[in-house]
Image: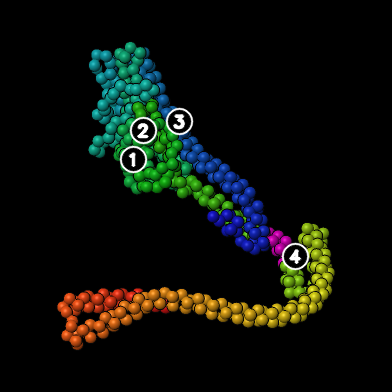
Amino acid sequence: MKTITAYLPHSLKTRLMLITLLFLLLPTSILGYLGYDYLSENIKKTQIRAVANVADTRFEQVIDLFRMNNLHATHFLHSLSTQCDENSCEHAALSRFIDDEEALGATLSDADGQTLSIGQIPMLKIRAFQDKQLVGFSKPSGKEAHHYYTKVCIEDASRCLVVVYPLKALQHIFMANSGLGISGDVFLLDANGFFVTRPHLLTRHIAGESPNDHATQHCLTQGNAELLDVDRRNIDIIHSFRFVPEMGGGCIMAHLDQKEAFATLNTMQWRVAMIAVTLIGFALYIALVIGRNIVKPIDKLCDVTHEIINGNYTVSAVVRGDDEISALANAFNLMTKRLESAFEALHSQQTQLEEQVQKRTQELFFAKNQAEEALALLQETQQSLVQAEKMAVLGSLVAGVAHEINTPLGITLTATSFLGDETKKTATLYQAGNLSGDELEAYFELAAQSTQLSVINCHRAADLIHSFK
């Protein structure tokens, strides 16, 4: 398994440069990264807080408007109960109130079911207000525009007043400069997610429509929050949500394009990149200078070493300064002088040794010649002894073979001679006419036995001869 040193460059100069770069760039990079991370986080938090401040400002303005509408209606209802006893007085007072409030209309009702309506009264489905709710919003249908209304009653609920307002006052709040730059926008949604005010960045009037996207659902269900998300145009946006319980569950949405919001961060990134490149170049230059100043004297020492390897012991290293490399050069020069003295002594010893070797070589040559002559005589004597031993062994072998072959040959000769004698006797009897049948049969039996005995012993002799080959 290779260690990490196996992957390092072999050049000392390169290693020194890398180490210098490491010690220069590593702390600087860490500090730079921490600083950049801190600044970038601050920029992001600042921009997100700016969007949140706009949402807070619009929230306060909307709540102030709703409270003012509710307070004016409450004050008017109480003053009407004490100042007017006739229907005509109530009609005139209600008309003046609508004009002063710039409302669309109003409806005054009592416990007996009698109502007095002034102005434009749209078809409203008025529901009981929730806790903290000050106004309600109509649900737009067809060409009918959005309206909002407030409802107040005296303590015993004997008389109630419903005042209907146009969206002009709300539009005025949201049409003002949002302070969110070119891409920023802020608008109001009702509890059903319909636009109450028009988003400025959309190309057509969509008040009364529902965006029905993830950000809107988050705004209507999870309340106040800041979120980095995309809008319905699929653009990265900083969202800020403010839930408005005073209008029955609507919310204010403020957002800003992240590209514009973090433009300062992008500029800072380019500046950091330029600073990093400059720093790397400067660090590289410093590392190169340091590496060269350290390695150059070592390179000269290497040159001197090569001269010594080639046999030049008179060279010496240049000593400059009093640093560690100069001390190394001094030690190197001292070592060179000692090497020169040692090699001179070694050369003298080598000359003496060569003379001794030459003398010993001559003596060995003379001894070698004597040894070779003795070896030749020994080999000749050994050859004679081997030849004599071979002849003795051969004589013993011939005697043994003769003894072994003599027995079957003797038996064969005896059987053959006996058969020859019997044949002559039988031939003599046959010629004389005295050969009987029994004698002839006896002869045949004797001839067969002699022949068989001769054949057996001849084969035995032949086998012995074959075995001695």
Q: Is the Cβ of the residue at disc 2 closer than 8 Å to that at disc 4?
A: no
111 within the magenta span: no
Q: Residue at x 24, y 78 (%)?
A: 447
Residue that label 1 marks: 213
In this picture the colour scheme is rainbow
| Residue drawn at 39 percent across, 22 percent down | 132
Give the image location of residue 309, x and y in percent: 73, 71
Tag 4 and tag 1, C-beta contact below 8 Å: no
Q: The disc labelled 4 sits on which kind of residue?
A: Pro
Tell me the CA gap for discs 4 and 1.
Answer: 72 Å
The 10 Å Cα crowd at callout 2, few under 14, some 14 to 19, many 20 or more, is many
Residue 385's image quarter? bottom right
Q: Which residue is mark 3?
A: 60
For label 1, the crowd category at 10 Å Cα-Cα, with few meaning under 14, some 14 to 19 and many 20 or more, is few
Mark positioned earlier in the residue sequence (3 or 1):
3
Q: Earlier in the sequence, mark 3 or mark 2?
A: 3
Q: Which circle's residue, 3 or 4, is located before the other in the chain?
A: 3
The residues bearing labels 3 and 2 have C-alpha atoms spaced at a distance of 18 Å
Mark 3 vs mark 1, CA separation in Å: 25 Å
Residue interval drawn in magenta: 286-301
Q: Is residue 31 left or right of residue 79?
A: right
Nearer the N terminus, badge 2 or badge 4? 2
Relative to 342, is 122 on the left or the right?
Answer: left
Query: Quick check: 161 above or below 268?
Result: above
User: Is residue 55 positioned above or below 233 on the image?
Assistant: above
Q: How far separated are the C-alphas under marks 2 and 1?
A: 11 Å
Q: Amino acid at mark 3?
A: Glu
